[in-house]
Amino acid sequence: MLIALSLFLPYFLGLGCIILFTIPGLQKDSPLDGPGIARLLATLLLSGILLHYTLVLLLEKLGLSLAIGSVLSLAGLFRAYLVLRIQAVRPRAFSWVLAGSILYVTILFALYILFDPLSAWDARSIWFFHGKIIFYNQSLSQSAGWNDQSFGWSHVFYPKLVPVLAAQFAYAGGFWNEYLPKASLLALLVPALMAFLAFFRSFRISFLYVILMLFMGLGQWLWNGYVDGYFALYTGLTSLFFGRWLVSRDNGDLIAGVAFLGVAVNLKNEGLFFALTVSSCMLAVRFVRARTAPAEAGSLGPGFWVFTALTALGMVLWSWKKHLWGLSTHVPMELARVPLRLSEGAFGTIVDALILREGVATACIVFLVALGIVKAFRLPISPAVWVPLLTSLAYGLGICLIYLGTPYDLPWHLGTSASRTMLPVLQGIFCATFVLMQELERNDTPENVKIEPKTKPRRG
Amino acid sequence: MKAFKILCVVGLLILSLVLFRTSTTTAVVLHSGWINVLGADSALHRLWSQFSTPSAGEHVLPPPVQAGIMLLRSNHVSSFRYSPAIGKDEEIRQRLIEGAYPLRNDDQARFCLSYESEPVAPTCVILARTGGMVLADCP
């Protein structure tokens, strides 16, 4: 079992390699310095996770998917070796202090992720119950009886990425218990932690902000088995990478953003709404930027679109399976209720619960203070700030609308979910504040203004 | 100017930590968790043996659910139904169905789980009882 656990990183890494080093043009011109390697590793792991999920959806059997996945993974690692052998990768450019800090945070969280048994409501009733069904049936197939009436309360139409990972860990370990399947959460935590290294060349105060606010701030949501914490983490990273791509024009940022978005849409149904929001906000910021700096508009190769299609494949396949199996997606919202709720003064209740009590207003104040400081120093405000901020606000408005149209008792619905549904909103505002903090730090050292590869690839 | 900017960044970090206490609380919880584990004799070994034991961790289930699952397993029942009183208790019902899986809940099943305080139908034969739960055979 220890072998099964320790092999999950190389397995996903190899699967990711088969995608990133096979699709032409994906690794072209991306710097392979310290932050570049961290970003590449995170993208590889996420691509691997998404490919494994797609394999399970296509082949259904856990054992067969793992066997074919292992062959692909080995082929991917070999392919990566061949490709990287002709490039000068300098691990010395990596900040070992930062890498050590990430390892330390992983170990800190691992205690509660791995050794705290599943006890939270949604974790048991939804995510890990679905994992248990997949594990005991050894497959994600209709024969498991997903449309059994007695499972009606379990929202069986929810995305199956975390359940598939949980079942796969249990399959590799050979048994089910209330601890082992939670290793799936660790598999999602590691790429997120690595991704943040992509934003640092050396140890900074903003690095402490990332660890304390973006990770520790999510608290128990990262280990109690709910998916909401990871969804918030992944939405925040998506908007950070998309925002930075608008500035850096480094397609590696865009690819990393797409990989994080690909996982986010397979974590929760809200992922699709987030994808719509973040894409719209990025296009809006890009449009405004293109009007002021038209020369910066760039083009994306076909490889990028193939990669994007691959990351969306899991979500498409699951939607198709739901249709085939007769599982209807229940959206807890009825538009007709919105005017009635507004006339009853529900908007005030929602604002009070979501914006004031969950800290969104406070986070906005901190952001405004940061913005004021940046303005006071007459520093330019990066467009990278606006993507997470606007996405967060637009997503928050959408969530308010869902609460306005909820068919359930509003105070009950707010009381049982507000603290979770506002996590992506808070995370987005924290990410925007983080970009501002980086602006303040970056202007101290002009050499860090532009992220450029320090090594020239050798042409072999 | 440079030092003042750094001070501002430190100020922003402190302001965020003061306003959002969860981050510092979590940091304390995570560290104290490890300190407790490393400080206690063989605690890590105990945690690892829990982690690597099939069906471990079921103690988090409510006691009636644990008792119900024990009855189902010890009597080698593959499908079961529950009494109306259990059906009304959302928590017990959900924990029983997901906790007992792969033993399936089926309204037409022959074996019925109920609370000890509930009357058992005259056509049923009580197979076993424990922890306030009863398993009955209702052909």
Image (tube, rainbow, N blue to C red):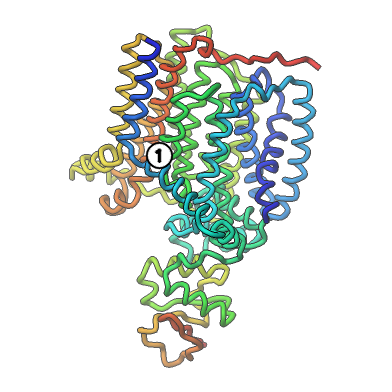
Above or below, B69 against B137 in this view is: above
Residue at left 43%, top 16%? A382
User: Which of A63 and A398 lies nearest the eye of the viewer?
Assistant: A63
User: Which of A166 and A377 lies nearest the eye of the viewer?
Assistant: A377
Position of residue A255 in the picture relative to residue A2 (left or right): left
Residue at left 36%, top 70%? B89
Residue at left 31%, top 27%? A366
Residue A6 location in percent, x, y?
A: 67, 47
At numbered mark 1, what does the secondary structure look like: helix, strand or loop? helix
Residue A177 location in percent, x, y?
A: 57, 62
Question: Which amino acid does the dot numbered 1 rest on?
Answer: Gly
Quarter occupied by the C terminus of chain A: top right
Residue B96 location in percent, x, y?
A: 46, 70
Residue A13 visible in the current orientation: yes
**Quadrant of res A298:** top right
Disc 1 sits on a residue from what chain? A
Position of residue A22 in the picture relative to residue B132 (left or right): right
Residue A131 visible in the current orientation: no
Q: Which residue is mark 1?
A: A217
Q: Which residue, as the protein is rendered here, is positioned at the far right?
A: A460
